[in-house]
Image (tube, helix red, strand yellow):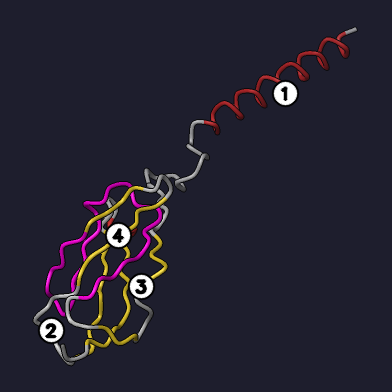
Amino acid sequence: MKTPRLLAIFFIAACFSTVNASEHHSGHGGGGGGGGGEQSCVKPQLTKFTPAHLASVAPGSAFSFLAFNVSKPEQIQVTVKTIPVEVTTENKDTFFLVKGKLPTDLVNTTVRINIKVNSKISRCDVENGWLVKITEK
C-alpha cells in the first residue's frame, strides 16, 4: 500500500518542479533581445536614390531618397563634401521621402551625397549614399 502513495507523491513532486521551472525560465525575457538587458534594433534602410548613381546633374539640382525604419526625421543628416545639406521629409506612414538640393557653389566635380541616420543605440546607426557628377552651370 505504501508504493501507490509513494508513486503519487513522486508524480505530484515532478509536476510541481516542471511548472516551477517553466515559470522561472519565462522571466528571462525570451521575447528578443538576447538577455543581459541588450536591446535589439532594426537598422534603417535607405533606397531609391535620385538622381541615379554617377548621373550628371547641374549645380543646385534636387535629389531624393526613401528612408525606412526611421522613427523621427531628425535622425537623418545629409552632407555633400562635408557640407551639411538642409532636407525636407514627408511621412508616408511606413517610410520617409527625403528631398534636398545640392549646393550651388559646387561646380564641375563629383560628390557623394552622404546620409547618416542616428539611432538611440549606436550600433543601429546607418550611413549610406551615392555619387553624382556636378557639371558646369
Which residue of the protein is positioned furthest toward the right in this rendering?
1
> Could you tell me the amino acid type at mark 3?
Thr
In percent of width and height, residue 6 lies at 81, 14
| Cα–Cα gap, marks 3 and 2 | 18 Å
Dot placed on the residue nearer the N-terminal end, 2 or 4:
4
| Cα–Cα gap, marks 4 and 3 | 10 Å
Inspect the magenta stretch and tell me whether residue 35 lies in it: no
| Cα–Cα gap, marks 2 and 4 | 21 Å
Q: Which residues are magenta?
A: 61-87
* Residue 50 disc label: 3
Which residue of the protein is positioned furthest toward the front in this rendering?
137
| Residue that label 2 marks | 106
| Residue that label 1 marks | 14
| Mark 3 and mark 1 residues within 8 Å of each other at the beta carbon | no
- Against 80, residue 54 (above or below) is below
| Residue that label 4 marks | 98
Dot placed on the residue nearer the N-terminal end, 3 or 1:
1
Q: Is residue 75 left or right of residue 95?
A: left
Q: Nearer the viewer, mark 3 or mark 1?
A: 3
Q: Number of marks in the image?
A: 4
The local crowd at label 4, few if under 14, some if 14 to 19, many if 20 or more residues have their Cα within 10 Å, is many
Quarter location, residue 107: bottom left
| Mark 1 and mark 2 residues within 8 Å of each other at the beta carbon | no
Q: Residue at x 13, y 84 (%)?
A: 106
